Image (tube, grey):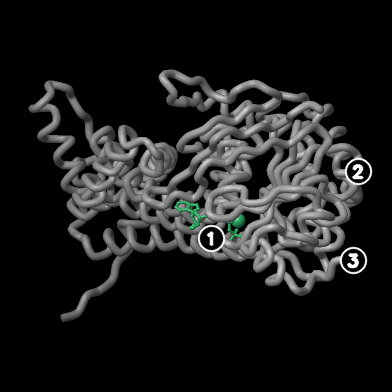
Amino acid sequence: MDEIVRIDGLHKSFGNLDVLKGIGMSVKAGETVVLLGSSGSGKSTLLRCVNFMEVPTQGQVFLHGDLVGSETNGKMSYRESELCSLRTRIGMVFQHFNLFPHMTVEQNVMEGQITVLKRTRTEARSKALAQLERVGLGDKAQEYPARLSGGQKQRVAIARALAMDPDVMLFDEVTSALDPELVGEVLKTMRQLADEGMTMLVVTHELGFAYHVANRVLFLDGGVILEEGEPQHILKNPKTTRMREFLDGHSLFKLPD
Amino acid sequence: MSHTWDFATIIQNWYVLWIGLKGTVFIFLVTVILGLSGGLIIGICRYAPSRALSWPAMAFVEVFRNTPVLVQIIWFYYAFPILTGIDVDPFLAAVLGISLNTMAFSAEIYRAGIQSIEPGQWEAGKAIGMTYNQSLRRVILPVAIKRVLPALTNRGIEVFKMSTLASVVAYVETLNQANLLADLNFNPIEAYTAVAVIFFVVLYPVVQGTYVLERVLKKGD
Ligand SMILES: Nc1ncnc2c1ncn2[C@@H]1O[C@H](COP(=O)(O)OP(=O)(O)OP(=O)(O)O)[C@@H](O)[C@H]1O
Ligand SMILES: [Mg+2]
């Protein structure tokens, strides 16, 4: 299968703090990969290195097999213009939605298409409406974000990312800021995307989602990927104590027998 | 200590003050436009990640925020021509002094506005492939400027009153014309009272308008 994202020997430090200490992983076309790990383990940092919201200290990222940046004498360098165009191909959804408050829902979804991809307004609008329909919010196109529920906001944020026609979508704890009763609608949308064949890398604490939707689960601990496997195996029979402790901490989730 | 008020000569010579008021409004428009737009550019530079931009902007702000406008106007009128050989008329000297000062103060207002925007907004722009400038223009500034609009209108009101400083180099504005009337008719008390009344009559409705604006903006948030 086609590798959409591949990461090799990735390190990331903030000053003296080594957060990622040699990550190797890949996401194949149509795959949903869930990334687990305790708070502060570096899940967000890893996700943000994939679309270069953070620039890795060391290591390489490939998109569709093409190396991002250029290497001279073992040192990577990146041009800002290359990173900008890379980010248009990688969708990202945040915990706190980050919708543009001064734009309507429709304008939020049109903005990147017009400003970055230089699509015409007509094209951008029809694309925006199609993506809003896809996440079940076709009727909210003219609302401002302030008038939406958290779950609706997050689905607009998903539509905004989808409208750029990304090769892969990154989700960083997108349900963590939601009231419990709104989590379901967002997870449902994500599951629908997975079923439609979208390639996704998902950081979440929703083990149910990992169990039922993920093709693969990675467990990040101590700056490395400590365990990796199919959810049905890895969530039921973790090999390491670290992962077992992590799973025990999520006692709300009961695995089906 | 008694004074018999007599506004007859002021009313007779109303057009002298009218000419002054026109001068006031004109210099106000020029300085407020230059000051608030120049301030936006300097405020953006002040915030910029590049030190090559932020340091000169900071130096500019500190120099013009910490020197009196009156001194600047006088300096541009008397000292600048001697130092550079470039002639400066009263209007230009006053415009320079007032608008540079306004740029410095409004730059800080814009910068505070930009700073008040949640980092997540920058991230959202970046994540859909926007450059720094695109995020700034399309995402950050529209909200930041709306947030600081009350502070900017206050600045505008200050600028309107600051315009009287132009009288020090005899630019034809309201206070300067009142000086003229006072000298002609020996009634400085009436002349300067008239100036105060004119400014109040012009500004009071404007200030009331800004309260309405603030309420409208609050609602929109
Ligand atoms: N920009 C930054 N500057 C300095 N330190 C940072 C920065 N971003 C993250 N860190 C640190 O890196 C470590 C990993 O952070 P990260 O946000 O990736 O963890 P996480 O696994 O996503 O945690 P959480 O589950 O709480 O979201 C933390 O110790 C954090 O304080
Ligand atoms: Mg995180």
Left or right: B39 with respect to B137?
Answer: left
The residue tagged 2 is A195
Secondary structure beneath label 3: loop
Left or right: B169 with respect to A162?
Answer: left
Q: Residue at x 55, y 59 (%)?
A: A40
Is residue B210 at least partly visible in the picture? yes
Q: Which numbered disc, 2 or 3, marks the residue closer to the eye?
A: 3
| CA gap, disc 1 and disc 3 | 62 Å
Secondary structure beneath label 1: helix
Q: Of all residues shown, which one is farthest toward the left?
A: B82
- The N terminus of chain A lies in quadrant: top right
The residue tagged 1 is B210
- The C terminus of chain A lies in quadrant: bottom right
Answer yes or no: do the residues labelled 2 and 1 have beta carbons within 8 Å?
Answer: no
The residue tagged 3 is A256
Q: Of all residues shown, which one is farthest toward the front?
A: A239
